[in-house]
Image (cartoon, helix red, strand yellow):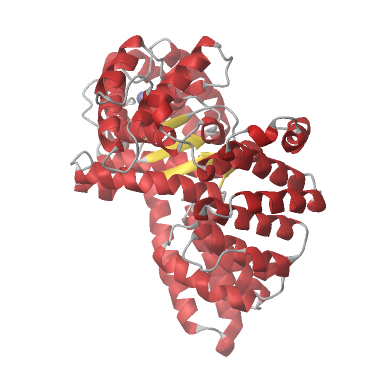
Amino acid sequence: MRYRFTASVETSLRALFLMAFLMSTSPQATAQTGLPTLGDTSDLTTSAERRLGDRIIRELYRDPDYIDDPVLVDYVQGIWQPLLAAAKARGELSAELDERFAWEILLGRDRTVNAFALPGGYLGVHLGLIGVVATRAELASVLAHELSHVTQRHISRLITQQSKQTPLLLGAMVLGALAASKNPGATQALVVGGQALAMQNQLNFSRDMEREADRIGYGLMAPAGFAPQGFVSMFEKLQQANRLNDNGSWPYLRSHPLTTERMADMQSRIPPGITPSPGAVVQASSEHAIVAARARVLSNPGVDTLRQWIAEPRGSGFQSQPLPRRAAALYAAALASSNLRDATGARAVARQLDDLVRQDPAAHRLVRLLMAEIELAAGDASAALASIPDGNAHRPELVLRTQALLRANRPVDATQALQTWVATHPKDSTVWQLLASTWQTQGQGLRAIRAEAEAQAARYDYAAAVDRFKAGQDMARRGGAAVDHIEASIIDTRLRAMESLLREQAAER
Ligand SMILES: [Zn+2]
């Protein structure tokens, strides 16, 4: 089935609710009665919820809107990991849930403002949200809220509640789904129909759940190192958008109606002394402003908008703006120029930006990465390599350096760092794919195929992984004495593991 990043929380929940039900349907019950038993549903187990999440995420990875931008991912991870650690330290996130769930964030190249929790510990975040938040703390407040929906098991509670309330609806869905399981083409129509039906049943987080996610999310902010006022200024931002009645570009508002109750609740939590304007206390950093600018450019705004951004630093009054705003405008202008294939223009603006933020290490690092990106797009691999900040410990540097080394025809120099990375991050599909490219250009076909297979496995596409591992086996057989036996035996082992996962998946259908 098609699961889109553009779906709002409500529609996501409707779709996943349907999927959850399909998964909890035991084949035995179906065989005996012709229909699965309804009504007597217990809470979704953590492992069932995780499997459900894995399936949804496999579809999301295939979505053309899915984007693995190393710079944005790195920034979001820098917020997400401290929040997770705080949730663990405060006992909100149990050891069992920590181990069972994925705790991964996927970014979607979508201009609308949205973030949503999915089953199994996955979060979807639109670039539109990153592009609109003014501070790191504001973004942290949204992630903390969504994280708390997951730690409080709101999704499993929802699914359980709903399956008790509407057995007739579920019956219709299951009948359709059983038919669909024999005819994959019917799945799409079924989901559309299921959504229309479920629409009447208000599949959404309840007000109590929202309040709980606010309260628990708020409690994570300070321990995770974020200004709790980020919650209030984010609410103020939502309230403004609400007043403007912004049509459709704020799906987050539809799923998270901003009630006066929620506002008052959050404001009352801010300790006295920080009033009257809690939002104003949190300063915007150049680093954050640059990241937000990047998110706006990468959300594909169209050529006219890119041109406006390129013109912005030349406008009157630009010099009187605060530094973070100027940094963001220059960054957007440079990246937009590069995307419109104007390397000369991009370089000139990037140099201005470089001078502007030289004293700010976090912002300066992002500018160095941008300069490398501009050079790489212009085809100058050695200039790109010269711009990339030292070290391979950070993913954006590692990915960009690898791309530049591949372009410079120096794959050997990239391999070691990539191998080290996947050893500690075995689910990093992008880096596996880069490793496959470096092996390929070194004529190491077997290793390249294995890395390609791992890249598929990391995105839960077990069928594609099996396909690649089998291709590896064939190659090893044909290779005879020249074959790398260690690699061949890894491939055998991994193929068996993937085949077994694939069988498990088939049994759940
Ligand atoms: Zn919520």
- In this view of the protein, which residue sits in the foreground, 282 or 365? 282
Image quarter hosting the C terminus: top left
Ligand 1 lies in quarter: top left
As rendered, which of 449 and 421 lies closer to the eye? Answer: 421
State the residue lying farthest toward the bottom: 481
Side (left or right) of 274 relative to 58? left
Residue at the limit of the structure toward the front, as seen here: 320
Q: Residue at x 72, y 37 (%)?
A: 313
User: Residue 74's spot in the image, x, y percent?
Assistant: 48, 51
* Picture residue at 44% right of the left edge, 57% below the top: 427
Q: Could you tell me residue 93's position as x and y percent? A: 23, 42
State which quadrant residue 283 falls in.
Answer: top left
Is residue 399 in sight in this rendering? yes
Q: Give the residue displayed 39% in from the left and 54% down from the top.
A: 501
Residue 165 higher or lower than 62, as above or below? above
- Residues 288 and 276: in front is 276
